[in-house]
Image (cartoon, rainbow, N blue to C red):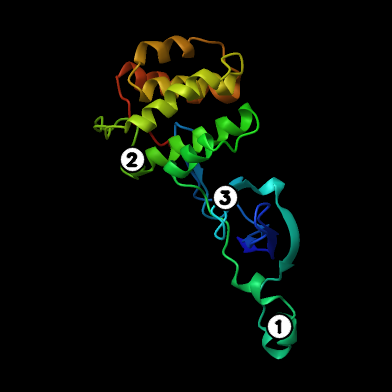
Amino acid sequence: MRPGPDKVIECPHCRTPARVFTLFSGNTCGARTWTDGKTIALMLPQPPFITKCSGCNHYFWLSEAKVIGEIPVWEPEMWLNPRTWRRIPGKWRAAKHVRELSEMESLEAIGVPVAHNIEQEVHLRVRAWWASNDPMRSRDQCEGAQIQTASPRSLEATMNLEHLLELLDESDPYERIVKAEVLRELGRFDDAIGLLDFNFPSEYAGVAALIRGFAKKKDPVVREILK
């Protein structure tokens, strides 16, 4: 992984600057993916789509923020020419990097509301779902492992999944699999199996079969997709 310069954006509400990391290059070596669709690739990190301003605490989509400059990657040569660094405004250098929202922040953003369309609402609800599953992500999970006991979901997390079910389009193969996984994690195993009784394109068939297998075992826990 080779980092690129930080983009500097400003909050659309209060104009507080924030930094967004970029990459010159990266790779997916060691990436891990789970049945809820989350992938963690330490060598290919991605900035969030939405964040919370450190100045005014408003939520905003990065696509709606104005880019006001960039901070170059620190190189040893800058010690020899410190004016390069001094030319960068102090507020930019002190600005915080944008961050992912927590589960509760994602749900709060939905209620504000910040989502302008169904796609953005789905994005927020999926991120809240992923965050609620994060405590269950462990390296000792495997297809043949003994079923772990799922931690009880909060009422807010359960309601979020129920709302997500209503937004997902069963005619889309990917969203159909996501919906089946939501049903499985809610303990609605027969409904999940029914959705997976479908002629999926080849790129989705393996994941669909894996989730179907867990549903048949009445396993409601998010699972890592082992390669």
Q: Nearer the viewer, mark 1 or mark 3?
A: 3
Residue denoted by label 3:
58
How packed mark 3 is, by other alpha carbons closer than 10 Å (few <14, some 14-19, many 20 or more), is some
Rounded to the nearest angstrom, the CA distance separating label 1 from label 3 is: 30 Å
> Which numbered marker is on residue 6?
none
Q: Is residue 87 visible?
A: yes
Q: Is residue 71 above or below residue 56?
A: below
> Which numbered marker is on residue 136?
2
Name the foreground residue: 77 vs 187: 187
Residue denoted by label 1:
86
- Closer to the chain start, of discs 2 and 3, is 3
Q: Is residue 38 visible?
A: no
Q: Amino acid at mark 3?
A: His
Q: Residue at x 34, y 43 (%)?
A: 135
Rounded to the nearest angstrom, the CA distance separating label 2 from label 1 is: 45 Å
Q: Secondary structure at mark 2?
A: helix
